[in-house]
Every structure is written in C-alpha cells, then in structure tokens.
C-alpha cells in the first residue's frame, strides 16, 4: 500500500491511473477506521482497479466548540487496517496541504444544509461539501463511497455532484452496526462502558419507530413523540438534539407518513454526539 | 464547427477528447463576441488541440435589477464569428440545462468577492465562480482563457481553482481596446453615439492615473481624487460606482503606491455599467 501525503503527488498519481484507463474507487474518511469503513473499502475493491482512501480530519466541518481537537487519530493503526483491507493508496494530507495560507473558497448546498444536523452545526455541511469537492478534484475517482449513517451528508454530496457536474458516481452503503444495534462510528470511542450501554437507545428508538409505523401509525409527530419518550425514560441524561421524520430526498419534515421516510435521531451521551437513522417504508 | 447544446453531450465529447490525449483549450463567454473574445480564442488555438467556447448568459451572476434580460444575445452572429475564428466546439447550453429544477449549490470565494464590483453586485462573483466551476467540470479543459478587463473575475477564478484543486490552468490576456482606448465589452452595445463618445472617459482617467504615478504621485487617495475630478468635469452625468487603487492579488485598497497596483474604475453612462482597469508599476 502506497502512502501519499502530498496533494500534488496524489493528483499526479491519479492522473497517471486515469490515463492508463484504470478505474479509481475512493473512500474519503476521517480515520479511526471501523467496520463501516471496511464495508465501503470492500465494495470499492470489487468495483474498481485502484482503491484510494483518504484520512483527513477536516477542521472546517467542526464548529468552534466541537470535538476537532479530541477527534480520534491513530494513523499507524489506521494504516495497518487499510493495508490489510487491500487499499492501494492511503492519502493522508496535512491540514496545510488542504487549506494553505489564504484559503477562502467554500461550497454551500443551500436548503439541505440547514436541516437535521445542519440546524445544530451551522457550518458543518459547508465544510463537508468543500473538502469532498477538493478531494474529488485531487483523487479524480470514478466512484466514491459513503456510509448511510451520515445520511444527510450523502444527500448533500449527491446534490453537489449533480449540481456542479462533478464527474464522479456516488454510492452509499447501509449502516454497519454492532451486535446490539449501535451504528459503527469513530465517535463511539468517546463512550465509557456505561455510556456505551446507554448508546443502544438510538437504535432502540428507531426500532420503536419502525414498529409503530408497521402497526399503522401514520402521524409523524406521534412517532417522534413516542421515540423521545422512550429515550427520556431509559436514558434520562441523554440530551436530544433532534428526533425527525423527513422525506429522504428533500430532508423536509413530513407530517403524515405516506411513503418511505427517513427517521433520524441525534443525541448526546456524555461527551459523544451520536447520530443514527433508518429508512422506513409504509 | 460542432455546436453542442446538451450538457451530457458536452461531457461525453470532452471525455473522449481527454482519453485521446487531446489538449482542450476553453473560452467561456456570455456571447456578443468581440475582439476581446477573439484574442482569447486565438491564444487557445495556438496552445491546444481542441478549442471549445461556451456561450451562456448566466442568470445567477446578475442582480435582480441588473441587465440579464436585455443582455445582448445574437446566436447566429456569434456562431458565424466563432466558426470563422476556428473554434472547434461551440457549447450553447440552455438555462434549464445548467440550472435544472432543484439546483441549490453555490461556490463562494470569500473576501475577494465583496471588493470592487462585488461591493455593488453582492451575488455577482458567487454566480461567476459557480458557473465557471460547472463549465470546467463539463468541458474538462486543460487551459481556460479569461480577459483582464474583468480583472477581479480572473483573480477570483484563479483563487477558486487553486483552493478547490481544480485541474485547469487559468490564463488571462490583456484588455483589447478600441482605437480611442475604450475597452472591448459586450455592454458597449448599450451605448448610443453620444454615450459612446463619453465612454472614452474610463480609459482617459486610467491614463491620467498612470501619468500621475509616473510623475511621482504615491498617495493612492490623491490619484483617485484626480481621476474622479476629471470624470466629473468631462462627463458630469456619469455615475461613478468606484475608482479604486488596490493590490492586484488581494484586491485590498492601498494607501501608498509602493509597488505594482491595479487602478480600477466602474461607472455608469446611460444604462451601461462600464468597467476598466490598468496595472501600473512604480
């Protein structure tokens, strides 16, 4: 596995591969690799000639009071995992390499970016859209892979790629979960043993939503209310950012559940802000 | 000359040419082609295998009260001019093709975009940056050519390309002028005969600035004041948006003229908003 730290070298490498007619599959990550990332890497291996992953903890997608500094970073461990997973190139740029002195260009996907997590993290998706566009220009992938745990991120990136005519195909893969249902996330590392136990509440609340809808409940508000109730009952100390039932394309809140909806939840357990979601069909 | 109206077809054409190893030179325009455009096309012909020009009057770079509707459009004349100039592909997309229903992604080059013209046209450069990024993704040029009359535009596009790692080389060419000094511009078509005569004042004021600096004047404010005085004396009905002396890279106003500066002027004559500029060395 090749490790590339220079933006220029990564561009040059990608250009050579593209000229050779090689198909580049790309998995952008912030490191702290887990099985969710591995499912993306495996898919990329199946569908492309060259698999590139990036590890870059992107400062501009963190708010001033968020966890940028303490976000888990373990390069040697990630490198080992990536190599074992069959990654061809690990792109590991510096912050300075991605945002040199004087950097000032930002991409904003209006509308979609201020819903759900965007309401609580006002510049988050601008940071995500910007770095993903940059990484696409640097890595020049044919296909890029994203996990559905960050459902809103996928919707926004697909929209950006379509809007800006970026010649990359976006694929999203299902959430990978621990045995007890907790969605894989680098931020799960923030949880101590007791918090880890309590974190099961996210998936449990989503399962409740599914049971309610399957049982005939069509009022989104009633489903959300019950979800919040069960969260408050079982984990009183959890701080809920949102429990939302939205259209999976527009991310607009729905009132009646008439067709497929996205049920999404974000809450704090201790110092970890955790998110999860489920697509529920009627 | 091939005329392509479909975005998809343009992408496919560009991809084929890129795969063949052909170098694509690109001149994005809003049509109403004049000798300024021709100088860009000629340069592109010299430096590339395939010359693509686009004609697209970009609605999102016009303010609500600006001249989008009456901007000069004459496709058959432009087509004739482009063909004669040796253009290989004329890309002529529809507004719907560039901004389909639901479009919502915008690129902003912070800081640079609110100076000079940006102070008077608050969303103009966001519109420019966005459409240029889109056109680059569609046309996939190796080199793109811009005229220095829109100096701020060139600075912003260069910054965007560098910031977003867009794999396109930006070249800018000197202003092409009429015999009496008026900078070539599609908007000169708005001028009646008397206004056309008065429009000479832009270049005359820039020449005055150069004489003053050559004569030893180093106070930017004094140069600007004299320029405004001569404009008001000779063309009292001209409405001045700005007369500015700025650093050519940061576009920040300078107070002392110590090294090369950009002297830029924007004013209204009748219904035409005209701009011009000059780089002046010390």
Image (tube, coloured by chain):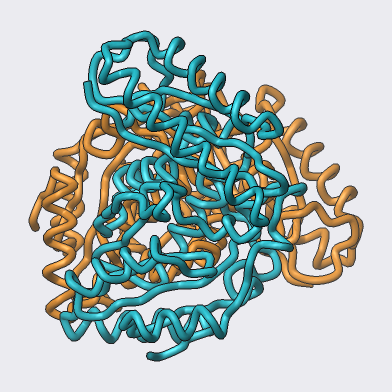
Chain colours: A orange, B cyan
* Quadrant of the image occupied by residue A167: bottom left
The reply to whether residue A181 is visible in this rendering is no
x and y percentages locating residue A127 in the rendered image = 47, 39
Q: From this viewpoint, which residue is outermost toward the left?
A: A2
Callout count: 0
Q: Nearer the viewer, residue B145 or A56?
A: B145
Q: Is residue B245 above or below residue A181?
A: above
Q: Nearer the viewer, residue A188 or A118?
A: A118
Q: Nearer the viewer, residue B208 or A108?
A: B208
Q: Is residue A97 above or below residue B90?
A: above
Q: Quadrant of the C terminus of chain A?
A: bottom right
Q: Nearer the viewer, residue A176 or B57?
A: B57
x and y percentages locating residue A154 in the rendered image = 52, 58
x and y percentages locating residue B243 in the rendered image = 51, 26
State the residue at coordinates (18%, 86%). B20
The reply to whether residue B153 is visible in this rendering is yes
Q: Is residue A32 above or below residue A280?
A: above
Q: Is residue B23 above or below residue A250?
A: below
State the residue at coordinates (38%, 32%). B207
State the residue at coordinates (38%, 83%). B89
State the residue at coordinates (66%, 74%). B96
Q: Quadrant of the N terminus of chain A?
A: bottom left
* Quadrant of the image occupied by residue A268: top right
x and y percentages locating residue A246 in the rendered image = 75, 55
Q: Is residue B245 left or right of residue A200?
A: left
* Quadrant of the image occupied by residue B36: bottom left
Q: Is residue A23 left or right of residue A142?
A: left
Q: Is residue A142 left or right of residue B59?
A: left
């Amino acid at each position: 596995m090749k490790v590339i730290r220079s933006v220029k070298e990564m561009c040059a490498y990608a250009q050579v591969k593209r000229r050779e007619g090689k198909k580049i599959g790309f998995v952008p990550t912030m490191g702290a690799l887990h099985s969710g990332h591995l499912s993306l890497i495996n898919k990329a291996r199946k569908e492309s000639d060259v698999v590139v992953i990036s590890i870059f903890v992107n400062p501009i997608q963190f708010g001033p009071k968020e966890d940028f500094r303490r976000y888990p970073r373990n390069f040697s461990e990630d490198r080992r995992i990536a190599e074992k997973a069959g990654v061809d190139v690990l792109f590991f740029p510096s912050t300075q390499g991605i945002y040199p002195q004087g950097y000032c260009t930002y991409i904003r996907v209006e509308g979609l970016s201020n819903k759900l997590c965007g309401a609580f993290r006002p510049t988050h998706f601008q940071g995500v859209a910007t770095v993903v566009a940059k990484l696409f220009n640097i890595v020049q992938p044919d296909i890029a892979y994203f996990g559905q745990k960050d459902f809103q991120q996928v919707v926004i990136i697909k929209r950006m790629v379509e809007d800006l005519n970026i010649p990359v195909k976006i694929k999203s893969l299902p959430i990978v979960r621990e045995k007890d249902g907790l969605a894989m996330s680098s931020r799960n590392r923030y949880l101590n043993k007791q918090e880890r136990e309590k974190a099961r509440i996210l998936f449990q609340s989503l399962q409740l939503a599914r049971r309610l809808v399957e049982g005939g409940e069509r009022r989104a508000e009633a489903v959300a209310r019950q979800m919040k109730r069960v969260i408050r009952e079982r984990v009183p100390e959890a701080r809920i950012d949102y429990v939302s039932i939205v259209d999976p394309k527009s991310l607009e809140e729905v009132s009646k559940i008439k067709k497929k909806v996205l049920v999404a939840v974000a809450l704090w357990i201790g110092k970890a802000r955790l998110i999860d979601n489920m697509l529920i069909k009627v």
